[in-house]
Image: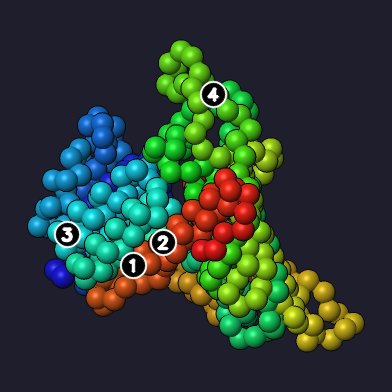
Amino acid sequence: MAAPINVALIGYAFMGKAHSNAYRQVTPFMSPRREPRMKVLCGRTQSRVQAAARQYGWEEAATDWREVVARKDIDLVDIATPGDLHAEIAIEAARHGKAVLCEKPLANSVAEAQAMVDAVDAAGVVHMICHNYRRIPAVVLARQLIEAGRIGTIRHFRGTYLQDWIAHPDFPLVWRLDKAQAGSGALGDIGAHVVDLARYLVGEINEVSGHLETFVKERPLPDGKPGRGTVTVDDASMALVRFENGAIGTIEATRMAPGRKNANRFEINGSTGSIAFDLERLNELEVYLEAEDAAVRGFHRVLATEPQHPFVKSWWPPGHIIGYEHTFVHTIYDLLEAIADKRVPSPNFHDGLRNQQVLAAIENSSTTRQWVSV
Ligand code: SOE
């Protein structure tokens, strides 16, 4: 692959902004062969994509993604569109031999996710799904502690992702509330992150009992249009889960928790200790270890900002905290390294497919009111 790595980003809303920022911030850390070049930003509306390209630092703006993914000078296609376009774009990009990064959830259905996996495997291209929370130093530390056996055999995973941005019944019917575009609601948008963390930290989920609810069934149409329309996705989802390794868990995702802005939290209990994390305090990991002296034993708040914590030493001196945007910088860093080394990083489309199967099982279980195997 020619140096630098030429990137095309499709989608310029919130996630497109986060990815753009990451390409800019990661550049000084990359060796010349691994440097990204922000070639083209693609979106539907000419005037808006042009403005975004200027603001985010892209060389060109385009409106036809098919033309963009076919370009010979593009190496990496980054998909940050609503879910209904993921499969089509990723499959076409793979067909043209491009590396592909795709936002979560991988697709709007298991069939689409499977087709995406088949396409990248057949083309032999590098692929990754953007579960950025795997690259928080405190979360990686949690995994390291688990892998080293510090909390023993895992028994419980308790994961919640709580937001409140649609709690008001007059919040408009944006695309994220439309099944045709988003695939599902809180379940796919934020529950997918919890499922990913559960898989990353504990292991494969093999059985679920799911419960979905849409509290506000109609909302005002967006963009000032008159009237109300039907909400076709869940506002909230909950599931009991069983892991292959014998652990049990709960996974909850809601956009209807007033006051909870972006509370992506988990607690894991093992036979000899526990760990807990909250994205709203993302530099910290709470750790309880039975092995510690009984007199001082208790939950410790570990600030994961020391040089030995993953990713941290590239940023600031010890104790200087990092933020949400760094989770994307770390993700893009690992992706660019993988592209230069011609290997598939993690999490990738195979993880995205498995995640999609768990989401589908939760939805299916909610409909049938039965436990469903994944
Ligand atoms: C909106 O709910 C959202 O931006 C998600 O789409 C992201 O994946 C999550 O990280 C934060 O919330």
For label 3, the crowd category at 10 Å Cα-Cα, with few meaning under 14, some 14 to 19 and many 20 or more, is some
> Residue 219, which numbered label?
4
Task: Find disc 2 in the rendering and name its residue.
Answer: 352
Q: Nearer the viewer, mark 1 or mark 2?
A: 2
Specify the amino acid type for callout 4.
Arg
> Residue 177, which numbered label?
none
Quote the CA–CA distance across marks 1 and 3: 19 Å
Q: Secondary structure at mark 2?
A: helix
Left or right: where does residue 17 sit relative to residue 232? left
Task: Find disc 1 in the rendering and name its residue.
Answer: 335
Specify the amino acid type for callout 3.
Arg
Quote the CA–CA distance across marks 2 and 3: 19 Å
Q: Is residue 225 above or below residue 110?
A: above
Quote the CA–CA distance across marks 4 and 1: 39 Å
**At 37% from the left edge and 45% from the top edge, which residue is drawn?**
83
Specify the amino acid type for callout 1.
Leu
**Quadrant position of the N terminus in the picture:** bottom left
Specify the amino acid type for callout 2.
Gly
Task: Find disc 3 in the rendering and name its residue.
Answer: 95
Residue farthest along the right direction in this orientation: 295
Q: Secondary structure at mark 3?
A: helix
Q: Nearer the viewer, mark 4 or mark 1?
A: 4
Q: Position of residue 306 (x, y in %)?
A: 58, 75
Q: Earlier in the sequence, mark 2 or mark 3?
A: 3
User: Are the residues at dot 1 and dot 3 in contact (C-beta closer than 8 Å)?
Assistant: no
Quote the CA–CA distance across marks 4 and 3: 40 Å
Q: Nearer the viewer, mark 1 or mark 3?
A: 3
Q: Earlier in the sequence, mark 4 or mark 2?
A: 4
Left or right: where does residue 187 sit relative to residue 50? right
